[in-house]
Amino acid sequence: MPGIRIHILLEPLFTWLRNPYSHVSEYAQSRRLTVAEDKCQPDYDGMAELWFDDVEDLLAARRSPEWQASSEDEANFIDTDKVAYFVSEEHILCDEAKLKK
């Protein structure tokens, strides 16, 4: 079921993310789907993506009081022993919209 996205935003986080000083250019949540025919079991329940225009914006966001408060709150709903964190740069190898032209 590619392309399915379910977004759940908590109001305080959403308000902060819409603030131009949050330094976040895009925020998305992806939640695990159970596919009966799929023999592979997922390693995670979901994934949150925060997009930044550059590394400086990422570092500025991480220094903010809102980021600190959010990080402290994660213990209430995230198993922090099973969290994977990484910073990446996207390289699009196939763009379906462009292929259809």
Image (cartoon, rainbow, N blue to C red):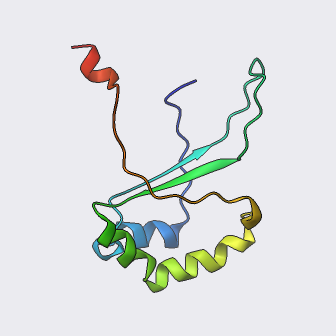
Question: Along the line of sight, which residue is nearer the eye, 90 or 33?
Answer: 90
89 lies above or below 91: below
Q: Residue at x 70, y 47 (%)?
A: 45
Q: Quadrant of the C terminus?
A: top left
Q: Against 22, is 99 above or below?
A: above
Residue ranking furthest to the bottom = 65
Residue drawn at 72 percent across, 64 percent down: 78
Side of 57 where 47 appears, left or right: right
Residue at image x 77%, y 33%?
41
Position in image of residue 47 (x %, y %): 59, 50
Foreground: 4 or 47?
47
Image coordinates for residue 98, horizontal then vertical, percent: 25, 21
The total of numbered circles placed on residues is 0
The spot of residue 57 in percent (x, y) is 32, 70
Residue at the image position 53 percent from the left and 26 percent from the top: 2
Give the image location of residue 16, x and y in percent: 42, 73
Looking at the figure, which quarter contains the N terminus?
top right
Please determine whether, in this image, residue 88 is positioned above or below residue 16. Answer: above
- Figure check: 65 above or below 3: below
Residue sticking out furthest to the top: 100
